[in-house]
Amino acid sequence: MAIKHAIRKALTAVGAPKRRKNYLARVNDDITNIPRILLANVAAMRNLGDHAITLGELAFLRHYFPQYPVAELNSVEWSRMNGLPHISKGIKNVKAVLIHGGGYMGTLWAGGEEAKAMDIISSAEPLPCAYFPQTVYYADDVAGRNRLGKNRSFYQEHSRVFFCLRDRRSFDFFKNDFSFARDRMLYTPDIALFVEDPLPSQRRQGVTLCMRNDQEKVTSANLTKQIETMCDELSLSHHRTDTVAPDFFPMSEREQKVYDKFLEFKCSELVITDRLHAMIFCAITHTPCLAMNNINGKVAGVYEWIKEFDFIRVIEPESIDNALISKMCGMNTNGYLSTRELLKPNFDAMAKQLGSFLDL
């Protein structure tokens, strides 16, 4: 395994200068002297939740800062180029760097995406940077505490970074353990909630189960089968799905892939899930949803932003029974505000603070 990793690293290094040249030629093509924003560390994998975050980030920037064109730099491009020595020298007219949001700050997912973000911050100096809304999670072990110490030192040294946190636990943790940055952090909604539902009303039928199968999962392996049995007893059709696409796809298809998942949920009487963005997709499409927490608590944390939607509930797995499923399937979700409208004061405040910090 170590040999294969070394070979891949060597091959990446050999091809990096050409990839860097090609990326810069593409991103700088036909650029005028108008200042612009770099949206960096954008997801390029199969997780549709991450792609919905990107759609929310782009919509947010177009809405609040329409005078600034947006250039994108995804995490795979950054890795394959071995980064950029100086972002402002390579990418023309960058005024500020916005870093892709999500749940990767800390030790979850081995800290790889945050490590890339930190490299981007270093490369961007002296440009101001800001994280779109994040969840922060550090494992309570030796490795977690070591990572926390290193990351704390990094962010203390880089004072031109603003932090948006999307759940109260993360915000309180950051306020305590990164207290030096208290004047540059904000508690604000997951940016995917800025996405508008593009779909007309649909006929709803059956139950959709969207369950994790990774290190964030805390529900039992048999839970899905138990729920399917309940659906059979209620004569409800059901199927399994995921917010992770089965195959990789080009970035030109990401909007359609996200909207296709919206449609799948919007055609459901009920979605049962332990995935954060499955719950968020239900909020956007006004689909009844029973949601369960994951390992870092982000589902319950983000639910606080949408708890006015009584067609969405965060529950303990053992509370699911036939009566609850039947009740949720019968809910009328007409007449609710969109998530963007519901959270407008929070998004307005976020835009004001980011604009001030980033001088936009």
Image: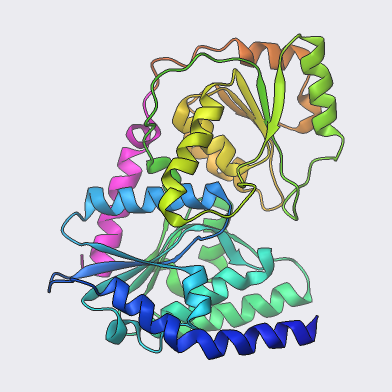
Residue 338 x %, y %: 37, 29
Residue 28 x %, y %: 25, 75
Q: Nearer the viewer, residue 271 or 297?
A: 271
In this rendering, does residue 307 appear at all? no
Could you tell me which residue is drawn at 72 percent across and 82 percent down? 5
Q: Is residue 9 left or right of residue 70?
A: right
Could you tell me which residue is drawn at 54 percent across and 47 percent down? 48
Looking at the rendering, the stretch of residues picked out in magenta corresponds to 337-360
Q: Is residue 73 positioned above or below 44 on the image? A: below
Q: Nearer the viewer, residue 35 or 133?
A: 35
Could you tell me which residue is drawn at 48 percent across and 76 percent down? 78
Residue 53 x %, y %: 46, 50
Q: Nearer the viewer, residue 225 or 126?
A: 225
- Look at the image and say whether residue 353 sits in the magenta stretch: yes
Q: Is residue 269 positioned above or below 62 on the image? A: above
Could you tell me which residue is drawn at 37 percent across and 42 percent down? 194
Q: Is residue 278 positioned above or below 169 on the image? A: above
